[in-house]
Image (tube, rainbow, N blue to C red):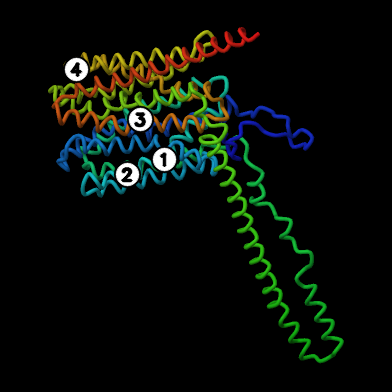
Amino acid sequence: MYTSHEDIGYDFEDDPKDKKTLKPHPNIDSGWAWMVVLSSFFVHILIMGSQMALGVLNVEWLEEFHQSRGLTAWVSSLSMGITLIVGPFIGLFINTCGCRRTAIIGGLVNSLGWVLSAYAANVHYLFITFGVTAGFGSGMAYLPAVVMVGRYFQKRRALAQGLSTTGTGFGTFLMTVLLKYLCAEYGWRNAMFIQGAVSLNLCVCGALMRPLSPGKELNDDGGGKDPQVVPAQSPGSKSSGQLDGAEEKGGGPRNEETLGDLPAQAGQEKAGHGQNMGAFRVLKTASQLTRRVKKGFRAWYSGYFGAASLFTNRMFVAFVFWALFAYSSFVVPFIHLPEIVNLYNLSEQNDVFPLTSIIAIVHIFAKVILGVVADLPCISVWNVFLMANFTLVLSIFILPLVHTYAGLAVICALIGFSSGYFSLMPVVTEDLVGIEHLANAYGIIICANGISALLGPPFAGWIYDITEKYDFSFYICGLLYMVGILFLLIQPCIQIIEQSRKKYMDGTRV
């Protein structure tokens, strides 16, 4: 669906006769493709890793502003939720501007949100600066990082996505340590200011997202000369005619005046010509941009609301329904585990090796392992995906029953390993809708995940404010998650029944 000049995976032959012949791009599955994986890896460190470490800042905000846990948790959940919810709208930016420009702008906006949050006077101020601003910037950088990896790989998509998304685990571990150190040494305000400077590296990551096939329009605007810039007549030709006329009429003084006016006339003509060409280029650029925006909007609109709408695919709709409940079960432990540890009087052990770091480290290896396993020809990606989901649901149900550090460490390791299925989400999405609809479809999926992340942590905090326990929060999240998985399992059965019924009806008619 997204066919912007930056993101086409095949080159057209130069010969007009062979315009319909496609040749694979040399960087598919090799070459610069691995630099794109590296870029996506660092995007996951800076965005998803820092968001999973927000439990450190959540404790600081509770002490600073003395608000309820439910209200304070909205800051972190807004940032996580908006990062994912804006996915479908970021698709419009990608279709219009390309992945590279979208990611660079996102890095700037994200950094601005962190810096402005350092001057927060209350929690409501953080809703705007950190939740909305930083969250929107994160979304602009995150979606291009996922989409570009999908476009650069065909044979090893699961492995490539797994390697790139391990940045979430590395980032969670590194950012947790970094934020703890910065908060202890400089206070949480200066910590957020420094983190804003670190987030500027997202612009570097965006610059590495080199397009597969640069468009011809860029060459037209490049350093080459525009054919219309070359004048058909030299500036002195007209002046020479005037000079000849002056010589015929005679009169030295007039001849000298004419000679004296020649440089001024030539300068005025050049200035006028330059202004005309400058205006022409501005109009040309504006026209190209307008066409690109219109084309991008039509492709974006048709993908969501047109005849080729993704919502006509019922299996994809079931996948979206699952995503509405899945992500909160992963996010809630990250946000509330630091406080749960304090409630269980396990702070000393947790300071030695944080439970969130255990999730992060195991998460790193899980994504690579699940990616390698899913790429095996004898293994179904869908089966690996479902097994990981069932393991995560089981871990969420067991977590409230464990009150020792060793037991919590084991459960966190299970959560980290089973959550490795996130590396398979782009692959599963592509199998459902095709590569041409990946950006649109994955934008919808992460939007559903964003809604889950937005509502999950405040809901858990709200349940704690009522019951003074986190147990019911995990039980309810697990139940909703199980409903989403069952919906995924039921939908293929319904399709099989409908196909069998259709064959039976066709056979009866014959």
Q: Which type of secondary structure does the marked residue at label 3 adopt?
A: helix
Number of the front mark, 1 or 4: 4
Residue at horizontal 54 percent and vertical 20 percent from the top = 156
Which of the two labelled residues, at mark 2 and mark 1, occupies the earlier sequence position? 2
**In the rendered image, which quarter contains the N terminus?**
top right
Q: Position of residue 306 (x, y in %)?
A: 55, 36
- Binning the other alpha carbons within 10 Å of mark 1 as few (below 14), some (14 to 19) or many (20 upward) gives some
Q: Is residue 177 left or right of residue 135?
A: left
Residues at badges 1 and 4 in contact (C-beta under 8 Å)? no
- Identify the residue under disc 3: 171
Residue at horizontal 46 percent and vertical 17 percent from the top = 371
- Identify the residue under disc 1: 201
Find the distance from the CA under tag 3 to the CA under tag 4: 23 Å
Quadrant position of residue 377: top right
Image disc number at residue 114: 2
- Binning the other alpha carbons within 10 Å of mark 4 as few (below 14), some (14 to 19) or many (20 upward) gives some
Residue type indicated by callout 1: Asn
Which of the two labelled residues, at mark 1 and mark 4, occupies the earlier sequence position? 1
Which of the two labelled residues, at mark 1 and mark 3, occupies the earlier sequence position? 3
